[in-house]
Image: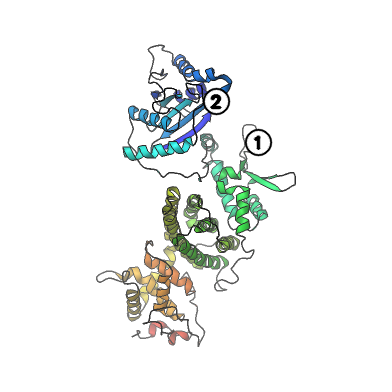
Amino acid sequence: MVPKIRRGSRTHGLLVYLYGPGRRDEHVDPHLVGSWDGFAPDPGRDTSADPDPKVTLARLTAALDLRIKQAGDRAPAKHVWHCSVRTDPGDRMLTDAEWNTVAQRLVAATGIAPEGDPDGCRWVAVRHADDHIHILATMVRGDLRRPRMNYDFKRAQAECRRIEQEWGLRRLNPGDGTGSKAPTSAERFKAERTGRPEPSRETLREAVRQALAGAATEEEFFTRLREAGLRVKVRTAPSGDAIGYNVALPGDRNRDGEPVWYPGSKLAPDLSLPKIRLRLGNDTVDLTTSAATSGRSDWSPPARERRSATGIAEHAAILLDSDDDNAAAHLVGVGELLDAVAQTSPAATRAELAAAAREFERATRSHVRAERADTRAIRSAARGIIQAGGALGRGEDGGTTAMLVSTLVLVTLAAARWHSARGHAQQAHASRQTAEHLRTAYCQAAATPMRALHDQGRALPEAVHRTHEATIRAVLPQQGPRAGGTPMKTDALVATLAQAEQAGHDPEALLQRAIAMRELDTAEDVTDVLVWRLRRIAQLPAHPGEATPQPQAGTRQPKTSTNDRTSNRTAPTAAARPGTDPRTRPPRR
């Protein structure tokens, strides 16, 4: 049940709308379901006194405005309190009597007409659709004082949550005042009228957020806004210093032909210039990307940057799992990373990744403030991805996209747990929704490389395959091949362990290291997660069609396991010699 509250100054004008046909003839059978005394004239159904509904509507207006006229200059300029209340599409249809109860409870909870108070404000509730009502109240009490209506929106929300629980309706998540301002009805109607897919406010919010992702300076942020095609107006003080900014979409004009400007603070609470400066000042990113020092030189810049970002995202998940309030700052960095990936993703995954970034925007804001948090690494990772440019949806680029998205699924689930532990219902829900979009994007990005890995695993000699299956069963018994089951689930993991061994790694020690990095309980497919972790830490190609790196002769891999049974194992001698095929070696004992 969703309440929306507005203030106005025209009682008669609002009643004309409520009892009229609507903007698209959507109003059906407008009628009163409740009023301040239960005897208010109803222009929709009351024809006993006068058959002309306009006359009855004028009588209702006069009755509602009586205290306003009596108060004279003491009445507020915006004396109309308007609250629309809508049920969820999946809820049952409420009766008129039930809607009357909803209206009475809301006007009492918000201070409009407290229960048992004979001097409460005058109000009516009008129903012209099955799923919602409109409550109109005039804000002067019977004793000609103004009602005490502090935090009326929060009180209305809280009362709606109680009604949902008592009546078995869908229970919505309570807000905390950190959400973005929703588009108004006028903005939505304008978008429909002009053929835009969404209101300008939402388009601008996403564009500003993307321009901020990984930006190192204020000047770079404004440059990105202009490069994105937005109109930008920087507000300056008499000293010449910037104190704010406004943005507008090209072609979006008001009735006077002027651009419709939106201040950053009206797009989202954290997009005002002071908040942006705080982020840029505290988390200055590296001006150079990490591509020069990350990964193999034969991989493309997008692939190297995605590999680097995967490790940094893993670290962010660990911080979120630690349940530290300072992780709040890293949520902002994760949001920037999602924006960067969405901007540069291949066409096949772009829609889902963009939806994930937009959904996670709600999860980046709460009342928790980090006292100390160094998010330079994650913001630099976002910058590196953007500067590396768009990634192709195939080869190593496509494989590293799947690698990064797989990790981001776990990061967003860790964010959901972090928010849930603090009672942030809306943020936790947004995090879980983000994970669903990322899972869909992962399936799209991983289809080709995982299919190739499964094929490679099945093509291994039976003895080699059996050896690596035994390793998986020993290290990860709950995920190993089960008797009578199909080994298909582990084929990609088997192929990865075989390639890691060929590159000079100890498969068992490497697998233990990958498992120990962080929990796997929230992974939808544990073997997929381990495949990408192994391929990243072993520097194996994300796309199996690429050449596997060979170790230098005479080198030995560092011991990475604390398990006594495997700590003395070294890289197989045959694997250390380039050109030796591991499939021709006998199985390990």
Q: Is residue 398 visible?
A: no
> Who's the residue at 38% across and 16% down the image?
46
Q: Amino acid at mark 1?
A: Glu
Q: Is residue 257 above or below residue 290?
A: above
Determine which quarter of the picture holds residue 3.
Answer: top left
Q: Which quadrant is the C terminus positioned in? A: bottom left
The mark that comes first in sequence, 1 or 2, is 2
- Residue 347 is situated, as x and y percent measured from the top left of the image, at 50, 56
Name the residue furthest left: 484
Query: Closer to the camera, 385 or 108?
Result: 108
Q: Residues within 10 Å of mark 2 (few under 14, many from 20)?
A: some
Q: Tell me the SS state at disc 2.
A: loop
- Residue 120 is situated, as x and y percent measured from the top left of the image, at 44, 24
> Who's the residue at 59% across and 72% down the image?
293
Q: Is residue 336 above or below residue 50?
A: below
Instruction: Read off the residue under disc 2.
Output: 9
User: Is 169 placed left or right of 578 in the picture?
Assistant: left
